[in-house]
Amino acid sequence: MASCLLLVDIQNDYFPGGRMELVGIGEASVNALALLDAFRQAKLPVIHVQHISAYPGATFFVPETKGVLINAVVAPQAGERVVTKSFPNSFRDTCLLDTLKDQGTDSLVICGAMSHMCIDATTRAAFDLGFGCTVAEDACATRDLVFKSRIVKAGDVHASFMAALSFPYAKVVLTKDVVAGMT
């Protein structure tokens, strides 16, 4: 099975001081780095997905700002592909599917942000396109949401979306389990 790591939207605006800080993004990025290091060591493909807002009046991931840049913790190295997107689904209007097909990928390890948005949309799309999917849940982050005047804490948002993805869309596991399975 040819596996590829997708690092989705691990960008400065989600970190402290950014325009849309996420709960637990520091810890998630450290776990994403562990995945990235393991894939690099194994010489397996890595794709960084970068969201660039195309909407007028966008408040984060605004083009040509520091916030839109991929965070230094997981910065791409020479030879690592960066796919830009403007929608939650990393496949929508991008070259991602063609890139994965060209490199013979049939399974994905997915991590990044936000759990309830781009991780969910990308994982479901990947499954529908026939990829085997693994989500490293501790390498993902999200934020508190509000629904009908009720605050839904980030931990509950994350747990709900990971539970929903865990069948049939993906194996939802810890970073250490992904890394251990690669050795």
Image (tube, helix red, strand yellow):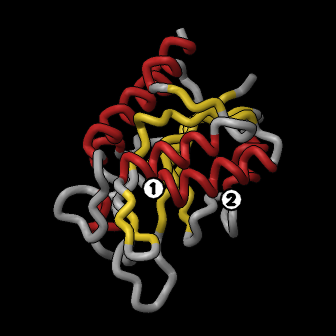
Neighbor class of circle 2 (other Cα within 10 Å; few <14, some 14-19, many 20+) is many
The amino acid at mark 2 is: Phe
Rendering coords of residue 49 (x, y %): 52, 54
The amino acid at mark 1 is: Met
Q: Is residue 25 above or below residue 138?
A: below
Residue at the image point whose x is 45% and y is 26% from the top = 175
Label 1, on which residue?
A: 114
- Residue 88 found in image quarter: bottom right
Q: Is residue 180 above or below residue 91?
A: above
Q: Nearer the viewer, residue 182 or 157?
A: 157
What number is the disc on residue 91? Answer: 2
Left or right of 56 in this view: 4? right
Left or right of 63 in this view: 15? left
Q: Is residue 172 above or below residue 70?
A: above
Left or right of 96 in this view: 174? left
Q: Nearer the viewer, residue 56 or 70?
A: 56
Rendering coords of residue 31 (x, y %): 36, 32
Rendering coords of residue 57 (x, y %): 40, 90
Rendering coords of residue 65 (x, y %): 29, 74
Residue at the image point whose x is 28% and y is 38% from the top = 27
